[in-house]
Amino acid sequence: MAKFTGRTSKSRKQPVQEVAKCETPDGLLNDAPASYPVADTTITALQIYHNPERKPDEDGPWNNEADKVAWIDEATGLGCIMLRQEDGTLSGYVGVGPEHPLYGFEADAVPISVSCEVHRGITYGKQCEVNRTELRAKGKPRQERYTVCHVTRTRWVQDYENVQTTKDEFEHEELWWLGFDTNHTGDRRPNDRYYSPRKGDEYRQQAYIYENCVALAKRLRDVADRKTMKSNGGLGQPLLPPTAEDQ
């Protein structure tokens, strides 16, 4: 199956299944790459999770949204994630590999020219959570539907097999994830008990998160491409002489 690599790669043709409404809306909904409609388009999602622990209880625009969606942006080859937080809001993340100029940058160190691409700027800069053993309520280990990391088959099924990943027991390439939140002033936070709604506050829907993720992925790819051009003397890839047919 495809996995997040942080590098531009040709998309592989894989069987795509339609996502059916899950009778038990808890856990992984797709057992293969699945089509997922968002923002007037359809992406091929590698993970689609529903998580009732974080889904707002009241009715709202989040009713038909998944709580975690992971996919590879076709235009850039970069891994992207939309993830619901405890306050009911959605956050977005894009992963880059070790060769990227911003790999290892913490959130406040990301250049403004990149940070400005997303809602209220970059607020997250961390490595894959694959080796972390963060505990949740009731002493349970952190589960896949909460993590910010690229997808492998082992991690894909760990919720069902109760596997706690604490070592690299499978092929794993570290990614560095840059992300943003939607829990700022002017954002509606449906699960935050300390939040007092104000006129004009807006819940940032999944379509909005997707558009921000795509914009960030494009800017991150541009940054990497500029570094490549600079290392090649500013010329990029050399042009080949025209063929007889072109002349």
Image: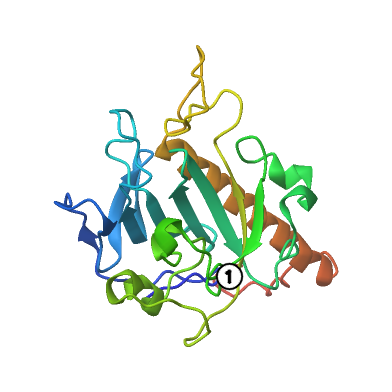
Q: Nearer the viewer, residue 90 or 175?
A: 90
**Quarter where residue 141 is shown:** bottom left
State the quadrant of the C terminus.
bottom right
* In this picture, residue 79 sits left or right of residue 108: left
Farthest residue in the top direction? 199
Location of residue 88 in the rendering, given as x and y in whole percent from the top left corner: 43, 38
Residue at 28% over, 28% down? 59
Badge 1: residue crowd in 10 Å (few <14, some 14–19, many ≥20): some
Q: Residue at x 17, y 53 (%)?
A: 24
Percent from the top left, x then y, of residue 80?
50, 57
The amino acid sitting under disc 1 is Arg
User: Vertically, is 195 above or below 133?
Assistant: above
* Residue 60 visible, this orientation: yes
Outermost right residue: 233
Rendered position, 163 above or below 82: below
Query: Residue sitting at 48 percent across and 23 percent down?
Result: 202
| Residue 51 pos. (x, y %) | 33, 51
Q: Which residue is mark 1?
A: 7
Q: Seen in the image, is 113 located left or right of residue 19?
A: right
Identify the residue at the far front of this view.
Answer: 138
The front one of 148 and 96 is 148
The answer to whether one can see residue 235 in this image is no
